């Protein structure tokens, strides 16, 4: 049966049971942009080839942790072919054969679609029973569980309270029930951890045993989406520490405090006693408000870059805006705006400024403005650095939810291969996920 006939049959079969839903939905659900901060229960989630989680809801998808909804068929064209379904039941990504390429699988009703590089693989969609014998139709959620997270290379499928372990090599299926687990509506392996989403909440679980730590569930909007504070019950501190949303900027003010900026919030870490505090950026740096690009500390001042402006604050409780600021990035750093990341090493006089793969050097002791930015080096290791910090032990570059440590600025520029990838939340911030 070719795709068109399959689709047609499916549509006919589904009109009846979906009729009541269609009536209560707006006429054209594709036109309505979805707001993920309004408490959506996602239909499915999987990481794409770039390692970015993609969340699916109805005919829309959300790429990454913030940004608007897009039509799913803008990226995965054929997903629209089964019109009447209006949603994806489940999604998973796994390594295709031995290569590092990610294959994405989407499950809709009794069919499965397989994509490589956003192109439908020949022979798909096919029935789930053909592609994954022993796995039921109408799934709720799916995820990959490769070795060594699971004992064998496994795909885990969720339907109601039943959990199916599909052995990728032997295709053997084992059905499990984990009483402690909620019924997942989507599931994700991300940064080596397993997450089960249900409603607007999620739990982290042990994929081998289904065990869940007592502190769960948590609100997905706090950890997987970049939403402004949306109501009561959101826990600032834990959220700011352990969120998977990218950092905007990070800096260490001289000896005492590390500041981490993300969206509308900042987190400060006391380097002496290791305590964390979190508050809104408005409460301490109200002229910045939110969405900082980069920050560095120099001689008792915190310099914060946002768009084409720089704000300078004198460290203290509370920090105070230095007279004459904001100034333009052009004046203070000799560059056009939109800085990705910046750092000054303790005791150093030179600011290193990242714009894409280019790093510039600015002599901060020079008091005549505009200062001049000098080309420093290219950083071929990263397309874009999100945040950077220099301390007594060297430089940390943050890219997405990971960071990379270099023992010095010089070694950072000399590096031609990636140092060990470390998790921001776990290593830098001491989170359990
Ligand atoms: C994409 O999906 C939407 C919603 O189902 C549909 O209205 C639109 O026609 C589709 N676009 C294409 C190019 O298939
Ligand atoms: C991996 O699988 C894809 C799709 O089935 C195929 O095109 C590709 O040649 C395979 N690669 C290797 C290294 O086997
Ligand atoms: C979980 O799914 C089972 C069916 O498999 C159902 O009986 C049960 O009510 C569901 N639990 C919740 C909390 O929805
Ligand atoms: C840690 O130090 C900061 C100031 O340096 C202080 O405000 C805070 O109360 C201290 N916390 C603890 C638990 O000692
Ligand atoms: C930085 O600027 C100061 C003041 O203009 C100058 O004395 C110093 O030599 C400069 N340092 C470097 C490394 O260019």
Image (cartoon, rainbow, N blue to C red):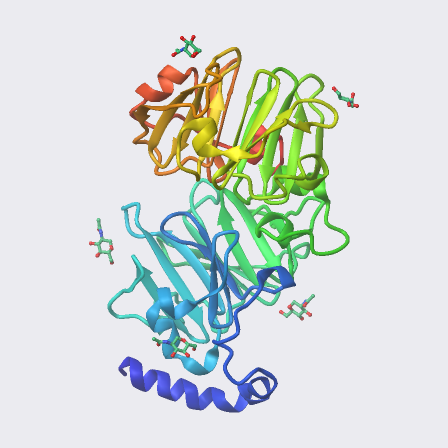
The answer to whether residue 156 is seen in the rendering is no
At x 29%, y 31%, the residue is 380
Residue 75 against residue 368 in the figure, above or below: below
- The picture places residue 268, in percent across and down from the top left corner, at 66, 29
Left or right? Give the position of 87 relative to 185.
Answer: left
Q: Quadrant of the C terminus?
A: top right
At x 62%, y 53%, the residue is 227
Residue 163 against residue 296 in the figure, above or below: below
The quarter holding residue 120 reads: bottom left
At x 73%, y 45%, the residue is 235
- Callout count: 0
- Nearest the camera: 176 or 44? 44
The answer to whether residue 130 is seen in the rendering is yes
- The picture places residue 14, in percent across and down from the top left corner, at 48, 86
The quarter holding residue 118 reads: bottom left
Residue 124 against residue 154 in the figure, above or below: below
At x 74%, y 56%, the residue is 231
Q: Quadrant of the N terminus?
A: bottom left
- Nearest the camera: 98 or 36? 36
Residue 51 against residue 348 in the figure, above or below: below
- The picture places residue 40, in percent across and down from the top left corner, at 61, 65
- Report ligand 1 position as a quadrant: bottom left
- The picture places residue 264, in percent across and down from the top left corner, at 63, 44
């Amino acid at each position: 049966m070719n795709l068109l006939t399959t689709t047609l049959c499916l549509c006919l079969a589904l009109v009846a049971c979906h009729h009541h839903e269609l009536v209560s939905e707006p006429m054209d659900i594709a036109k309505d942009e979805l707001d993920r901060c309004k408490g959506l229960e996602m239909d499915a989630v999987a990481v794409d080839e770039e390692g970015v989680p993609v969340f699916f809801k109805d005919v829309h998808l959300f790429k990454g942790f913030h940004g608007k909804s897009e039509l799913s068929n803008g990226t995965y064209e054929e997903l629209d072919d089964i019109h009447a379904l209006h949603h994806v039941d489940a999604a998973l990504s796994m390594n295709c054969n031995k290569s590092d390429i990610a294959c994405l699988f989407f499950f809709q009703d009794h069919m499965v679609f397989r994509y490589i590089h956003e192109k439908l693989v020949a022979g798909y969609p096919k029935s789930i029973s053909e592609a994954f014998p022993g796995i039921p139709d109408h799934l709720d959620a799916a995820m990959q569980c490769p070795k060594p997270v699971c004992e064998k290379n496994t795909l885990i499928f969720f339907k109601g309270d039943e959990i199916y372990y599909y052995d990728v090599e032997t295709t053997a299926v084992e059905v499990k029930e984990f009483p402690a687990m909620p019924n997942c509506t989507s599931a994700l392996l991300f940064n080596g951890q397993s997450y089960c989403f249900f409603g607007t909440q999620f739990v982290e679980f042990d994929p081998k045993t289904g065990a869940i730590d007592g502190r769960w569930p948590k609100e997905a909007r706090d950890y997987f989406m970049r939403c402004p504070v949306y109501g009561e019950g959101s826990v600032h501190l834990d959220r700011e520490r352990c969120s998977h949303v990218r950092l905007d900027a990070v800096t260490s003010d001289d000896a005492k405090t590390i500041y981490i900026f993300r969206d509308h919030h900042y987190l400060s870490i006391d380097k002496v006693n290791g305590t964390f505090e979190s508050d809104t950026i408005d409460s301490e740096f109200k002229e910045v408000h939110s969405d900082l690009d980069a920050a560095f500390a120099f001689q008792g001042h915190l310099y914060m870059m946002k768009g084409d402006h720089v704000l300078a604050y004198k460290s203290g409780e509370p920090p105070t805006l230095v007279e004459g600021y904001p100034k333009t990035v052009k004046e203070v750093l000799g560059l056009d705006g939109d800085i990705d990341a910046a750092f000054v090493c303790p005791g150093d006089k030179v600011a290193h400024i990242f714009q894409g793969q280019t790093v510039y050097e600015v002599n901060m002791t020079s008091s005549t403005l505009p200062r001049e930015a000098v080309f420093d080096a290219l950083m071929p290791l990263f397309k874009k650095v999100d945040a950077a910090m220099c301390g007594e032990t060297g430089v940390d570059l943050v890219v997405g939810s990971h960071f990379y440590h270099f023992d010095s600025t010089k070694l950072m520029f000399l590096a031609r291969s990636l140092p060990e990838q470390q998790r921001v939340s776990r290593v830098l911030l001491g989170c359990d996920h």
